[in-house]
Image (cartoon, helix red, strand yellow):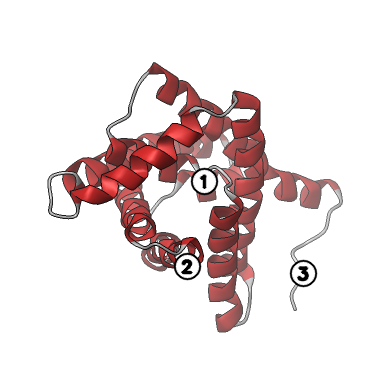
């Protein structure tokens, strides 16, 4: 039953990212779109939903069962992102799919090494966002962590696997190449997410409290 709940909260996490992605595609300004995309992670952290890119950051701080949960969450996120993108294609805002197509074509045309590196950098920022929300003692600091972490990774063009699951679904561009792209993206996110936690453990330093 617990695994079912983990998956359902993963689906809800994917849907939240889909909403953020739809907001990003709906505005002409990239900085403004990056800001509004943050609603996805804001909702996930506020309601305790599951997001692979956030949960994977703590995989070495938990047992093997946690790693399995991360895999379940990934599939839940995929289902939620796909559901969000597919559902929106059937609505009057479907024209934003044209922007998703342009975005995805650029992503799928990139080299896999580039995708991996951009994914690593993405999840360094996601860790900063979620760990800041979790540990910052100041209310303002918690939310600034979310907003800066998300907006910066989008403005820089870094690769977030769950966001890309939504964009591919919105664009209707799933293919063998897209699956490989997502898997490489996921691997990069996983590596990027654990860099700071592993460095913290190796130096026996606890998070700074400002």
Mark 3 vs mark 2: which is more N-terminal?
2
Q: Quadrant of residue 130?
A: bottom right
Percent of width and height locating residue 190: 59, 37
Label annotation for residue 53: 1
What is the CA distance from the residue labelled 1 to the residue labelled 2?
A: 19 Å
Mark 1 vs mark 2: which is more N-terminal?
2
Q: Is residue 28 visible?
A: yes
Mark 1 vs mark 3: which is more N-terminal?
1
In the displayed structure, would residue 174 be above or below residue 32? Answer: above
Percent of width and height locating residue 24: 39, 58
Quarter of the rendering occupied by the N terminus: top left
**Mark 3 = which residue?**
208
Secondary structure beneath label 2: helix
Q: Is residue 44 left or right of residue 201?
A: left
Front position among marks 3 and 2: 2
Q: Residue at x 37, y 65 (%)?
A: 43
Secondary structure beneath label 3: loop
In the rendered image, the residue lying farthest to the right is 203
Please tell me how many numbered marks the rendered image carries. 3
Front position among marks 1 and 3: 1
Density class for disc 3 (Cα within 10 Å; few <14, some 14-19, many ≥20) is: few
Label annotation for residue 131: none
């Amino acid at each position: 039953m617990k695994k079912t709940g983990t998956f359902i909260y993963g689906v809800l996490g994917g849907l939240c990212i889909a909403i953020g992605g739809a907001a990003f595609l709906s505005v002409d300004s990239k900085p403004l779109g990056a800001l509004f995309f943050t609603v996805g992670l804001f909702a996930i952290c506020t309601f305790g939903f599951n997001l692979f890119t956030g949960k994977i950051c703590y995989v070495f701080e938990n047992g093997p069962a946690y790693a399995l949960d991360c895999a379940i969450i990934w599939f839940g996120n995929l289902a939620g992102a796909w559901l969000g993108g597919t559902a929106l294609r059937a609505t009057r805002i479907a024209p934003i799919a044209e922007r998703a197509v342009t975005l995805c074509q650029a992503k799928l045309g990139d080299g896999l090494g580039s995708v991996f590196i951009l994914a690593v950098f993405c999840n360094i920022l996601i860790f900063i966002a979620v760990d800041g929300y979790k540990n910052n003692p100041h209310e303002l600091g918690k939310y600034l962590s979310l907003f800066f972490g998300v907006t910066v990774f989008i403005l820089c063009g870094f690769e977030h696997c769950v966001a890309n699951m939504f964009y591919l679904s919105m664009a209707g561009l799933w293919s063998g190449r897209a699956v490989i792209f997502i898997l490489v993206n996921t691997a990069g996110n996983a590596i990027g997410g654990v860099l700071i936690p592993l460095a913290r453990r190796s130096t026996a330093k606890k998070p700074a409290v400002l």
